[in-house]
Image (spheres, helix red, strand yellow):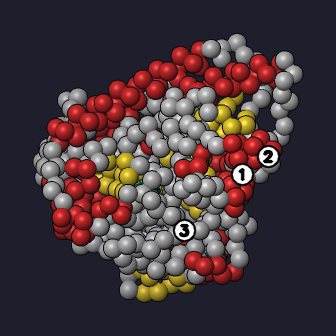
Protein backbone atom coordinates (compact mmCIF):
# COMPACT_ATOMS: atom_id res chain seq x y z
CA UNK A 1 0.00 0.00 0.00
CA UNK A 2 1.25 3.42 -0.91
CA UNK A 3 0.62 6.54 1.14
CA UNK A 4 1.10 10.13 0.16
CA UNK A 5 3.35 12.16 2.38
CA UNK A 6 1.86 14.05 5.29
CA UNK A 7 0.07 12.60 8.25
CA UNK A 8 -3.26 14.33 8.04
CA UNK A 9 -4.31 14.12 4.43
CA UNK A 10 -6.98 11.79 3.11
CA UNK A 11 -5.07 8.90 1.60
CA UNK A 12 -6.17 6.30 -0.86
CA UNK A 13 -4.77 2.84 -1.41
CA UNK A 14 -3.74 1.52 -4.81
CA UNK A 15 -6.97 -0.42 -5.20
CA UNK A 16 -8.90 2.77 -4.78
CA UNK A 17 -10.33 2.15 -1.30
CA UNK A 18 -9.93 4.74 1.38
CA UNK A 19 -7.48 3.87 4.10
CA UNK A 20 -10.20 4.70 6.62
CA UNK A 21 -12.36 1.93 5.14
CA UNK A 22 -9.49 -0.50 5.30
CA UNK A 23 -8.76 0.40 8.89
CA UNK A 24 -12.40 -0.27 9.70
CA UNK A 25 -12.34 -3.64 7.97
CA UNK A 26 -9.25 -4.61 9.89
CA UNK A 27 -10.90 -3.43 13.09
CA UNK A 28 -13.89 -5.63 12.26
CA UNK A 29 -11.58 -8.57 11.62
CA UNK A 30 -10.97 -8.84 15.39
CA UNK A 31 -8.12 -11.21 15.46
CA UNK A 32 -7.44 -14.71 14.29
CA UNK A 33 -9.98 -17.41 13.86
CA UNK A 34 -12.92 -15.15 13.30
CA UNK A 35 -12.76 -14.65 9.57
CA UNK A 36 -11.51 -16.37 6.48
CA UNK A 37 -13.11 -19.12 4.55
CA UNK A 38 -11.51 -22.21 5.96
CA UNK A 39 -13.22 -22.25 9.31
CA UNK A 40 -9.79 -22.53 10.89
CA UNK A 41 -7.93 -19.69 12.49
CA UNK A 42 -7.10 -17.93 9.30
CA UNK A 43 -4.62 -15.16 9.89
CA UNK A 44 -1.14 -15.35 11.19
CA UNK A 45 2.30 -16.17 10.19
CA UNK A 46 1.62 -18.98 7.77
CA UNK A 47 -1.45 -17.45 6.14
CA UNK A 48 -1.38 -16.73 2.44
CA UNK A 49 -3.30 -14.52 0.06
CA UNK A 50 -6.18 -16.97 -0.14
CA UNK A 51 -6.66 -17.09 3.63
CA UNK A 52 -6.97 -13.40 4.43
CA UNK A 53 -9.27 -10.58 3.50
CA UNK A 54 -7.53 -8.75 0.62
CA UNK A 55 -7.06 -5.51 2.55
CA UNK A 56 -5.36 -7.36 5.40
CA UNK A 57 -3.23 -9.41 3.03
CA UNK A 58 -2.12 -6.13 1.47
CA UNK A 59 -0.89 -5.00 4.88
CA UNK A 60 0.95 -8.17 5.83
CA UNK A 61 2.15 -9.62 2.53
CA UNK A 62 5.51 -7.81 2.50
CA UNK A 63 6.03 -7.66 6.25
CA UNK A 64 8.65 -10.26 7.17
CA UNK A 65 7.37 -10.66 10.73
CA UNK A 66 3.64 -10.72 10.04
CA UNK A 67 3.91 -13.21 7.17
CA UNK A 68 6.10 -16.30 7.42
CA UNK A 69 6.00 -16.58 3.67
CA UNK A 70 7.24 -13.01 3.25
CA UNK A 71 10.17 -13.51 5.57
CA UNK A 72 12.03 -15.54 2.96
CA UNK A 73 11.92 -12.58 0.58
CA UNK A 74 11.59 -9.26 2.41
CA UNK A 75 13.79 -7.55 4.96
CA UNK A 76 13.26 -5.27 7.93
CA UNK A 77 15.48 -2.82 9.67
CA UNK A 78 15.49 -1.39 13.18
CA UNK A 79 16.86 1.97 14.25
CA UNK A 80 18.10 2.24 17.83
CA UNK A 81 16.64 5.63 18.77
CA UNK A 82 15.00 4.65 22.08
CA UNK A 83 17.54 4.04 24.86
CA UNK A 84 15.44 4.49 28.03
CA UNK A 85 13.03 2.02 29.58
CA UNK A 86 10.24 2.42 32.13
CA UNK A 87 10.05 -1.10 33.50
CA UNK A 88 12.49 -3.79 34.55
CA UNK A 89 12.18 -7.30 33.17
CA UNK A 90 14.10 -10.07 34.89
CA UNK A 91 15.37 -11.26 31.51
CA UNK A 92 16.89 -7.90 30.58
CA UNK A 93 20.18 -6.27 31.39
CA UNK A 94 19.99 -2.64 30.31
CA UNK A 95 23.34 -2.72 28.60
CA UNK A 96 21.95 -5.31 26.21
CA UNK A 97 19.27 -4.99 23.54
CA UNK A 98 15.65 -5.06 24.63
CA UNK A 99 14.90 -8.75 25.07
CA UNK A 100 11.33 -8.04 23.97
CA UNK A 101 12.49 -7.71 20.42
CA UNK A 102 16.14 -8.57 20.31
CA UNK A 103 18.69 -11.13 21.17
CA UNK A 104 21.27 -10.28 23.80
CA UNK A 105 24.01 -8.25 22.19
CA UNK A 106 24.89 -4.63 22.58
CA UNK A 107 23.55 -2.06 20.18
CA UNK A 108 26.50 -0.76 18.21
CA UNK A 109 25.28 2.83 17.98
CA UNK A 110 22.40 4.81 19.37
CA UNK A 111 21.00 7.23 16.80
CA UNK A 112 19.22 10.56 16.77
CA UNK A 113 16.03 10.70 14.68
CA UNK A 114 17.85 12.57 11.91
CA UNK A 115 20.66 10.00 11.83
CA UNK A 116 18.06 7.24 11.87
CA UNK A 117 16.21 8.73 8.90
CA UNK A 118 19.47 8.93 6.94
CA UNK A 119 20.21 5.35 7.77
CA UNK A 120 16.78 4.22 6.59
CA UNK A 121 17.24 5.91 3.23
CA UNK A 122 20.74 4.44 2.87
CA UNK A 123 19.46 0.95 3.59
CA UNK A 124 16.39 1.39 1.39
CA UNK A 125 18.57 2.38 -1.56
CA UNK A 126 20.96 -0.56 -0.99
CA UNK A 127 18.50 -3.29 -0.02
CA UNK A 128 15.38 -2.78 -2.16
CA UNK A 129 13.60 -5.69 -0.50
CA UNK A 130 13.72 -3.81 2.83
CA UNK A 131 10.03 -3.03 3.31
CA UNK A 132 9.67 -2.39 7.05
CA UNK A 133 11.20 0.02 9.53
CA UNK A 134 10.77 -1.04 13.14
CA UNK A 135 11.62 0.79 16.34
CA UNK A 136 12.24 -1.79 19.01
CA UNK A 137 14.65 -0.32 21.48
CA UNK A 138 17.22 -0.78 22.82
CA UNK A 139 14.88 0.44 25.62
CA UNK A 140 11.16 0.96 25.13
CA UNK A 141 10.09 3.17 22.19
CA UNK A 142 7.18 4.66 24.15
CA UNK A 143 9.44 5.55 27.07
CA UNK A 144 11.18 7.75 24.44
CA UNK A 145 8.13 9.08 22.59
CA UNK A 146 9.68 12.27 21.19
CA UNK A 147 12.58 10.43 19.52
CA UNK A 148 10.39 7.57 18.35
CA UNK A 149 7.69 9.69 16.74
CA UNK A 150 10.13 12.19 15.26
CA UNK A 151 11.82 9.27 13.52
CA UNK A 152 8.49 7.97 12.23
CA UNK A 153 7.54 11.44 11.03
CA UNK A 154 10.77 11.81 9.07
CA UNK A 155 10.40 8.42 7.43
CA UNK A 156 6.72 8.91 6.77
CA UNK A 157 7.52 12.07 4.85
CA UNK A 158 10.62 10.92 2.96
CA UNK A 159 10.15 7.20 2.30
CA UNK A 160 6.40 6.65 2.02
CA UNK A 161 6.64 3.08 0.70
CA UNK A 162 8.20 1.80 3.91
CA UNK A 163 5.87 0.25 6.47
CA UNK A 164 6.30 1.55 10.00
CA UNK A 165 6.39 -0.84 12.92
CA UNK A 166 6.72 -0.41 16.66
CA UNK A 167 7.43 -2.77 19.53
CA UNK A 168 6.63 -1.83 23.11
CA UNK A 169 6.20 -3.21 26.59
CA UNK A 170 2.79 -1.52 26.51
CA UNK A 171 2.99 0.50 29.73
CA UNK A 172 2.54 3.87 27.98
CA UNK A 173 0.66 2.54 24.95
CA UNK A 174 -2.83 3.93 25.78
CA UNK A 175 -1.35 7.45 25.89
CA UNK A 176 0.07 7.22 22.36
CA UNK A 177 -2.55 5.44 20.28
CA UNK A 178 -3.60 8.65 18.51
CA UNK A 179 -0.02 9.48 17.52
CA UNK A 180 0.61 5.92 16.36
CA UNK A 181 -2.43 6.22 14.09
CA UNK A 182 -1.41 9.71 12.92
CA UNK A 183 1.84 8.44 11.42
CA UNK A 184 0.24 5.33 9.93
CA UNK A 185 2.24 3.00 12.13
CA UNK A 186 0.03 0.09 11.22
CA UNK A 187 1.94 -2.73 12.92
CA UNK A 188 2.41 -2.69 16.69
CA UNK A 189 3.92 -5.41 18.83
CA UNK A 190 3.19 -5.57 22.56
CA UNK A 191 5.19 -7.90 24.76
CA UNK A 192 2.69 -9.53 27.11
CA UNK A 193 4.13 -12.22 29.35
CA UNK A 194 1.23 -12.54 31.79
CA UNK A 195 -2.31 -11.46 32.56
CA UNK A 196 -2.03 -12.58 36.20
CA UNK A 197 -0.20 -10.09 38.46
CA UNK A 198 1.03 -12.86 40.76
CA UNK A 199 2.93 -14.32 37.81
CA UNK A 200 3.88 -10.83 36.69
CA UNK A 201 5.55 -10.14 40.03
CA UNK A 202 7.98 -12.99 39.24
CA UNK A 203 8.93 -11.39 35.92
CA UNK A 204 8.89 -7.64 36.65
CA UNK A 205 10.54 -6.35 39.85
CA UNK A 206 9.37 -2.78 39.21
CA UNK A 207 7.78 -0.31 36.85
CA UNK A 208 8.05 3.47 36.73
CA UNK A 209 4.66 4.95 35.94
CA UNK A 210 3.50 8.58 36.10
CA UNK A 211 6.55 9.67 38.13
CA UNK A 212 6.19 6.89 40.67
CA UNK A 213 7.96 3.60 41.12
CA UNK A 214 5.77 0.53 41.77
CA UNK A 215 6.95 -2.93 42.74
CA UNK A 216 5.63 -6.49 43.03
CA UNK A 217 2.01 -7.37 42.40
CA UNK A 218 0.89 -3.74 42.21
CA UNK A 219 3.40 -3.04 39.43
CA UNK A 220 2.33 -6.11 37.48
CA UNK A 221 -1.36 -5.21 37.85
CA UNK A 222 -0.80 -1.75 36.38
CA UNK A 223 1.30 -3.22 33.58
CA UNK A 224 -1.22 -5.86 32.55
CA UNK A 225 -4.13 -3.39 32.71
CA UNK A 226 -2.26 -0.92 30.51
CA UNK A 227 -1.11 -3.57 28.03
CA UNK A 228 -4.60 -4.98 27.51
CA UNK A 229 -6.16 -1.53 27.33
CA UNK A 230 -3.60 -0.46 24.72
CA UNK A 231 -4.21 -3.63 22.70
CA UNK A 232 -7.96 -3.02 22.66
CA UNK A 233 -7.54 0.62 21.68
CA UNK A 234 -5.27 -0.27 18.78
CA UNK A 235 -7.41 -3.06 17.38
CA UNK A 236 -10.50 -0.86 17.65
CA UNK A 237 -8.69 1.55 15.34
CA UNK A 238 -7.78 -1.19 12.92
CA UNK A 239 -4.06 -1.22 13.69
CA UNK A 240 -2.58 -4.69 13.34
CA UNK A 241 -1.23 -5.96 16.65
CA UNK A 242 1.15 -8.78 17.31
CA UNK A 243 1.75 -10.02 20.84
CA UNK A 244 5.17 -11.29 21.82
CA UNK A 245 5.50 -13.50 24.89
CA UNK A 246 8.71 -14.80 26.42
CA UNK A 247 8.31 -18.43 27.50
CA UNK A 248 9.88 -18.86 30.94
CA UNK A 249 9.66 -22.50 32.10
CA UNK A 250 8.19 -22.84 35.58
CA UNK A 251 7.12 -19.17 35.64
CA UNK A 252 4.66 -18.48 32.81
CA UNK A 253 4.87 -21.45 30.43
CA UNK A 254 1.46 -22.95 31.30
CA UNK A 255 -0.03 -19.49 31.84
CA UNK A 256 0.75 -18.43 28.26
CA UNK A 257 -2.27 -20.40 27.06
CA UNK A 258 -4.40 -18.00 29.11
CA UNK A 259 -2.45 -15.04 27.74
CA UNK A 260 -3.13 -16.39 24.26
CA UNK A 261 -6.90 -16.42 24.90
CA UNK A 262 -6.83 -12.96 26.45
CA UNK A 263 -5.03 -11.35 23.53
CA UNK A 264 -7.00 -13.19 20.90
CA UNK A 265 -10.27 -12.01 22.42
CA UNK A 266 -8.98 -8.42 22.23
CA UNK A 267 -8.23 -8.68 18.53
CA UNK A 268 -4.51 -9.48 18.39
CA UNK A 269 -3.55 -10.55 14.89
CA UNK A 270 -0.68 -12.87 15.71
CA UNK A 271 0.98 -14.40 18.77
CA UNK A 272 4.73 -14.91 18.92
CA UNK A 273 5.88 -17.11 21.80
CA UNK A 274 9.67 -16.78 22.04
CA UNK A 275 12.09 -18.83 24.13
CA UNK A 276 13.71 -17.15 27.12
CA UNK A 277 17.37 -16.53 26.34
CA UNK A 278 19.16 -16.67 29.64
CA UNK A 279 22.80 -17.20 30.45
CA UNK A 280 24.86 -16.02 33.43
CA UNK A 281 27.11 -13.91 31.20
CA UNK A 282 24.14 -11.71 30.20
CA UNK A 283 24.01 -10.45 33.78
CA UNK A 284 20.21 -10.65 33.97
CA UNK A 285 18.30 -11.73 37.07
CA UNK A 286 17.16 -14.89 35.34
CA UNK A 287 20.65 -15.52 33.98
CA UNK A 288 22.21 -15.18 37.41
CA UNK A 289 19.58 -17.28 39.19
CA UNK A 290 19.96 -20.11 36.69
CA UNK A 291 16.48 -19.79 35.22
CA UNK A 292 16.58 -21.98 32.13
CA UNK A 293 14.94 -21.40 28.77
CA UNK A 294 12.69 -23.97 27.08
CA UNK A 295 13.94 -26.81 24.93
CA UNK A 296 12.95 -26.91 21.27
CA UNK A 297 10.24 -29.49 21.91
CA UNK A 298 8.81 -27.59 24.90
CA UNK A 299 8.54 -24.46 22.78
CA UNK A 300 6.97 -26.27 19.85
CA UNK A 301 4.47 -28.06 22.11
CA UNK A 302 3.29 -24.74 23.57
CA UNK A 303 3.09 -23.12 20.13
CA UNK A 304 1.19 -26.14 18.78
CA UNK A 305 -1.11 -26.05 21.82
CA UNK A 306 -1.98 -22.40 21.24
CA UNK A 307 -2.40 -22.82 17.49
CA UNK A 308 -5.95 -24.12 17.83
CA UNK A 309 -6.76 -20.80 19.47
CA UNK A 310 -4.80 -18.61 17.10
CA UNK A 311 -2.10 -18.89 14.45
CA UNK A 312 1.36 -18.52 15.83
CA UNK A 313 4.48 -16.77 14.63
CA UNK A 314 7.34 -19.27 14.54
CA UNK A 315 9.95 -17.46 12.51
CA UNK A 316 10.95 -14.73 14.99
CA UNK A 317 14.72 -14.32 15.26
CA UNK A 318 14.68 -12.21 18.43
CA UNK A 319 16.52 -9.53 16.53
CA UNK A 320 18.82 -6.81 17.73
CA UNK A 321 17.39 -3.32 18.13
CA UNK A 322 19.64 -2.24 15.24
CA UNK A 323 19.17 -5.27 13.00
CA UNK A 324 19.21 -4.84 9.21
CA UNK A 325 18.36 -7.41 6.57
CA UNK A 326 16.35 -10.56 6.13
CA UNK A 327 15.30 -12.13 9.43
CA UNK A 328 18.13 -14.46 10.34
CA UNK A 329 20.83 -12.35 8.70
CA UNK A 330 22.31 -9.18 10.12
CA UNK A 331 23.80 -6.57 7.81
CA UNK A 332 23.93 -3.81 10.44
CA UNK A 333 27.73 -3.66 10.24
CA UNK A 334 27.41 -2.40 6.63
CA UNK A 335 25.44 0.62 7.79
CA UNK A 336 27.36 2.25 10.61
CA UNK A 337 27.12 6.05 10.79
CA UNK A 338 30.61 6.44 9.32
CA UNK A 339 29.78 4.23 6.36
CA UNK A 340 26.45 5.93 5.75
CA UNK A 341 28.11 9.34 5.67
CA UNK A 342 30.45 8.07 2.94
CA UNK A 343 27.63 6.47 0.94
CA UNK A 344 25.93 7.90 -2.08
CA UNK A 345 22.29 7.53 -1.17
CA UNK A 346 19.91 7.26 -4.08
CA UNK A 347 16.47 6.50 -2.73
CA UNK A 348 14.38 5.79 -5.80
CA UNK A 349 10.91 4.47 -5.19
CA UNK A 350 10.53 3.22 -8.79
CA UNK A 351 13.72 1.15 -8.61
CA UNK A 352 12.52 -0.33 -5.35
CA UNK A 353 9.13 -1.15 -6.84
CA UNK A 354 10.68 -2.76 -9.92
CA UNK A 355 12.92 -4.92 -7.75
CA UNK A 356 10.03 -5.90 -5.52
CA UNK A 357 8.00 -6.89 -8.57
CA UNK A 358 10.76 -9.38 -9.47
CA UNK A 359 10.74 -10.70 -5.92
CA UNK A 360 6.99 -11.11 -6.19
CA UNK A 361 7.34 -13.16 -9.41
CA UNK A 362 9.80 -15.49 -7.70
CA UNK A 363 7.50 -15.77 -4.72
CA UNK A 364 4.51 -16.65 -6.91
CA UNK A 365 6.62 -19.28 -8.72
CA UNK A 366 7.49 -20.77 -5.35
CA UNK A 367 3.87 -20.94 -4.24
CA UNK A 368 2.80 -22.49 -7.55
CA UNK A 369 5.57 -25.12 -7.35
CA UNK A 370 4.53 -26.01 -3.80
CA UNK A 371 0.88 -26.36 -4.77
CA UNK A 372 1.74 -28.56 -7.74
CA UNK A 373 3.93 -30.81 -5.58
CA UNK A 374 1.24 -30.98 -2.92
CA UNK A 375 -1.07 -32.47 -5.52
CA UNK A 376 1.24 -35.48 -5.76
CA UNK A 377 0.59 -36.25 -2.08
CA UNK A 378 -3.15 -36.54 -2.66
CA UNK A 379 -4.33 -40.01 -1.69
CA UNK A 380 -1.35 -40.71 0.59
CA UNK A 381 -2.73 -42.09 3.86
CA UNK A 382 -0.25 -41.93 6.71
CA UNK A 383 -0.01 -40.35 10.14
CA UNK A 384 3.80 -40.14 9.91
CA UNK A 385 5.17 -36.67 10.73
CA UNK A 386 8.84 -35.78 10.57
CA UNK A 387 10.92 -32.67 11.01
CA UNK A 388 13.62 -31.64 8.56
CA UNK A 389 16.26 -28.93 8.84
CA UNK A 390 17.06 -26.72 5.83
CA UNK A 391 20.15 -24.64 5.09
CA UNK A 392 19.04 -21.51 3.23
CA UNK A 393 20.25 -17.99 2.53
CA UNK A 394 16.73 -16.83 1.64
CA UNK A 395 14.41 -16.75 -1.33
CA UNK A 396 12.71 -19.92 -0.08
CA UNK A 397 15.38 -22.12 -1.68
CA UNK A 398 17.79 -24.80 -0.46
CA UNK A 399 20.80 -22.66 -1.27
CA UNK A 400 23.28 -22.76 1.62
CA UNK A 401 26.21 -25.10 2.21
CA UNK A 402 26.07 -27.11 5.42
CA UNK A 403 29.31 -25.61 6.68
CA UNK A 404 28.21 -22.03 5.99
CA UNK A 405 24.84 -22.22 7.71
CA UNK A 406 24.37 -19.91 10.69
CA UNK A 407 20.88 -21.26 11.20
CA UNK A 408 18.67 -24.07 9.96
CA UNK A 409 15.01 -23.62 9.18
CA UNK A 410 12.80 -26.39 10.50
CA UNK A 411 9.84 -27.79 8.56
CA UNK A 412 7.31 -30.34 9.70
CA UNK A 413 6.39 -32.79 6.93
CA UNK A 414 3.14 -34.74 6.85
CA UNK A 415 0.56 -35.71 4.27
CA UNK A 416 -0.80 -32.17 4.75
CA UNK A 417 2.43 -30.77 3.23
CA UNK A 418 5.45 -28.88 4.54
CA UNK A 419 4.95 -26.42 7.37
CA UNK A 420 7.56 -24.01 8.74
CA UNK A 421 7.75 -24.61 12.50
CA UNK A 422 10.92 -22.83 13.60
CA UNK A 423 14.60 -22.27 13.16
CA UNK A 424 17.76 -23.17 15.05
CA UNK A 425 20.77 -20.93 15.23
CA UNK A 426 24.16 -22.66 15.16
CA UNK A 427 27.84 -21.85 15.15
CA UNK A 428 29.51 -22.08 11.76
CA UNK A 429 30.92 -25.52 11.06
CA UNK A 430 33.22 -24.42 8.25
CA UNK A 431 36.19 -22.44 9.55
CA UNK A 432 37.71 -21.75 6.13
CA UNK A 433 39.40 -24.91 5.01
CA UNK A 434 38.58 -27.16 7.93
CA UNK A 435 35.52 -28.20 9.91
CA UNK A 436 35.10 -27.43 13.61
CA UNK A 437 34.14 -30.65 15.41
CA UNK A 438 32.75 -28.75 18.41
CA UNK A 439 30.49 -26.79 16.11
CA UNK A 440 29.37 -29.99 14.42
CA UNK A 441 28.32 -31.43 17.80
CA UNK A 442 26.38 -28.19 18.40
CA UNK A 443 24.68 -28.43 15.01
CA UNK A 444 23.67 -32.02 15.65
CA UNK A 445 22.23 -31.07 19.05
CA UNK A 446 20.35 -28.17 17.47
CA UNK A 447 18.69 -30.34 14.81
CA UNK A 448 18.60 -33.58 16.77
CA UNK A 449 14.81 -33.80 16.43
CA UNK A 450 15.08 -33.83 12.60
CA UNK A 451 15.10 -36.86 10.31
CA UNK A 452 17.02 -35.09 7.55
CA UNK A 453 18.98 -31.96 6.76
CA UNK A 454 18.63 -30.32 3.32
CA UNK A 455 21.74 -28.54 2.07
CA UNK A 456 23.13 -27.15 -1.18
CA UNK A 457 26.41 -28.97 -0.52
CA UNK A 458 28.09 -30.96 2.26
CA UNK A 459 31.51 -32.50 2.80
CA UNK A 460 32.31 -36.11 3.60
CA UNK A 461 33.15 -35.71 7.31
CA UNK A 462 30.00 -33.95 8.50
CA UNK A 463 27.95 -36.21 6.27
CA UNK A 464 29.24 -39.31 8.05
CA UNK A 465 28.67 -37.82 11.51
CA UNK A 466 25.12 -36.78 10.64
CA UNK A 467 24.31 -40.25 9.35
CA UNK A 468 25.72 -41.70 12.58
CA UNK A 469 23.39 -39.38 14.52
CA UNK A 470 20.42 -40.63 12.48
CA UNK A 471 20.03 -37.44 10.42
CA UNK A 472 20.00 -38.00 6.67
CA UNK A 473 22.00 -35.38 4.70
CA UNK A 474 20.06 -34.48 1.53
CA UNK A 475 21.77 -32.46 -1.22
CA UNK A 476 19.74 -33.59 -4.21
CA UNK A 477 17.49 -30.51 -4.02
CA UNK A 478 20.30 -27.95 -4.16
CA UNK A 479 18.96 -24.51 -5.22
CA UNK A 480 15.39 -25.81 -5.54
CA UNK A 481 12.41 -24.37 -3.67
CA UNK A 482 12.28 -25.62 -0.08
CA UNK A 483 8.63 -26.61 0.27
CA UNK A 484 8.38 -28.24 -3.13
CA UNK A 485 11.54 -30.26 -2.38
CA UNK A 486 10.39 -31.16 1.11
CA UNK A 487 7.08 -32.51 -0.15
CA UNK A 488 8.86 -34.54 -2.84
CA UNK A 489 11.25 -35.91 -0.21
CA UNK A 490 8.38 -36.81 2.10
CA UNK A 491 6.57 -38.70 -0.64
CA UNK A 492 9.74 -40.68 -1.26
CA UNK A 493 10.18 -41.15 2.51
CA UNK A 494 6.71 -42.71 2.80
CA UNK A 495 7.59 -44.97 -0.13
CA UNK A 496 10.77 -46.10 1.61
CA UNK A 497 8.77 -46.93 4.73
CA UNK A 498 6.37 -49.00 2.65
CA UNK A 499 9.18 -51.01 1.08
CA UNK A 500 10.84 -51.53 4.48
CA UNK A 501 13.95 -49.60 3.46
CA UNK A 502 13.57 -47.35 6.50
CA UNK A 503 11.75 -47.53 9.81
CA UNK A 504 10.69 -44.21 11.26
CA UNK A 505 12.08 -43.63 14.73
CA UNK A 506 11.02 -41.13 17.35
CA UNK A 507 13.72 -38.48 17.42
CA UNK A 508 14.96 -36.87 20.65
CA UNK A 509 14.71 -33.28 21.81
CA UNK A 510 16.91 -30.47 20.47
CA UNK A 511 18.73 -27.50 21.94
CA UNK A 512 17.83 -23.87 21.45
CA UNK A 513 21.11 -22.06 21.19
CA UNK A 514 21.81 -19.62 24.01
CA UNK A 515 24.08 -16.65 23.83
CA UNK A 516 24.82 -13.69 21.67
CA UNK A 517 24.32 -13.49 17.95
CA UNK A 518 27.45 -13.65 15.86
CA UNK A 519 26.96 -11.27 12.99
CA UNK A 520 28.61 -11.73 9.63
FE1 LIG B 1 10.93 -5.18 14.00
FE2 LIG B 1 9.27 -6.35 15.58
FE3 LIG B 1 8.39 -4.81 13.69
FE4 LIG B 1 9.42 -7.11 13.09
S1 LIG B 1 11.09 -7.58 14.55
S2 LIG B 1 9.59 -4.14 15.40
S3 LIG B 1 7.56 -6.79 14.25
S4 LIG B 1 9.89 -5.18 12.12
FE5 LIG B 1 10.19 -9.69 14.00
FE6 LIG B 1 12.54 -9.47 15.05
FE7 LIG B 1 10.88 -11.27 16.02
FE8 LIG B 1 10.42 -8.75 16.39
S5 LIG B 1 11.73 -11.24 13.99
S6 LIG B 1 12.15 -9.86 17.18
S7 LIG B 1 8.94 -10.25 15.71
FE1 LIG C 1 14.57 -4.53 28.92
FE2 LIG C 1 12.77 -4.21 27.02
FE3 LIG C 1 12.02 -5.16 29.45
FE4 LIG C 1 12.71 -2.61 29.12
S1 LIG C 1 10.93 -3.66 28.21
S2 LIG C 1 13.41 -3.98 30.76
S3 LIG C 1 14.38 -2.71 27.62
S4 LIG C 1 13.35 -6.18 27.96
Ranked by sequence position, the earlier of labels 2 and 3 is 2
Q: Which residue is mark 2?
A: 469
Q: Quadrant of the C terminus?
A: bottom left
Task: Give coordinates of residue 353: x percent, y percent.
Answer: 22, 36
Q: CA distance from mark 2 to mark 1?
A: 7 Å
At horizontal 27% and vertical 44% (from top left) the residue drawn is 128
Q: Quadrant of the N terminus?
A: top left
Marks 2 & 1, CB-CB < 8 Å contact: yes
Ranked by sequence position, the earlier of labels 3 and 1 is 1
Q: Secondary structure at mark 2?
A: loop
Ranked by sequence position, the earlier of labels 2 and 1 is 1
Rendering quarter of residue 212: bottom left
Q: Name above or below for residue 480 compared with residue 238.
A: above
Please name whichever residue, 375 or 36, is drawn nearer the observer in this view of the structure. Answer: 375
Q: CA distance from mark 3 to mark 1?
A: 19 Å
Query: For the residues carrying marks 2 and 3, which lies nearer the camera in this image?
Result: 2
327 with respect to 343 (left or right): right
At horizontal 63% and vertical 55% (from top left) the residue drawn is 435
Task: Give coordinates of residue 12: x percent, y percent.
Answer: 18, 37
At horizontal 47% and vertical 75% (from top left) the residue drawn is 96
- Callout 3: 10 Å neighbours few (<14), some, many (20+)? some
Q: Secondary structure at mark 1?
A: helix
Q: Which residue is mark 1?
A: 444
Marks 2 & 3, CB-CB < 8 Å contact: no
Q: Which residue is mark 3?
A: 516
Question: Mark 2 vs ligand 1: CB under 8 Å?
Answer: no
Rendering quarter of residue 385: top right
Q: CA distance from mark 2 to mark 3?
A: 27 Å
Q: Name above or below for residue 268 compared with residue 351.
A: below
Amino acid sequence: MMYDAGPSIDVTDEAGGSVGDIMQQIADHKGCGTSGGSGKASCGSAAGSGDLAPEIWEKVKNHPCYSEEAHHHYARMHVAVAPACNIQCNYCNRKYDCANESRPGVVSEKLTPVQAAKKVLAVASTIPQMTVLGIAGPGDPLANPAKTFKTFELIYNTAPDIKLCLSTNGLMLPDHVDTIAKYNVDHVTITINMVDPDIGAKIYPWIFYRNKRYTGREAAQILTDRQLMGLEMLTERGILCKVNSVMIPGVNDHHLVEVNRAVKSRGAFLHNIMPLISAPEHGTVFGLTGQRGPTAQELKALQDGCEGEMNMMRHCRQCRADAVGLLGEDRSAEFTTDKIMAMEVDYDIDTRRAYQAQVEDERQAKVAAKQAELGTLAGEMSDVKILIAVATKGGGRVNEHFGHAKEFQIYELSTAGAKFVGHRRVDLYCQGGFGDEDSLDGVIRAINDCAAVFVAKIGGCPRADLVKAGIEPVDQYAHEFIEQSAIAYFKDYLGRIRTGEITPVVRGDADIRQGAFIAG
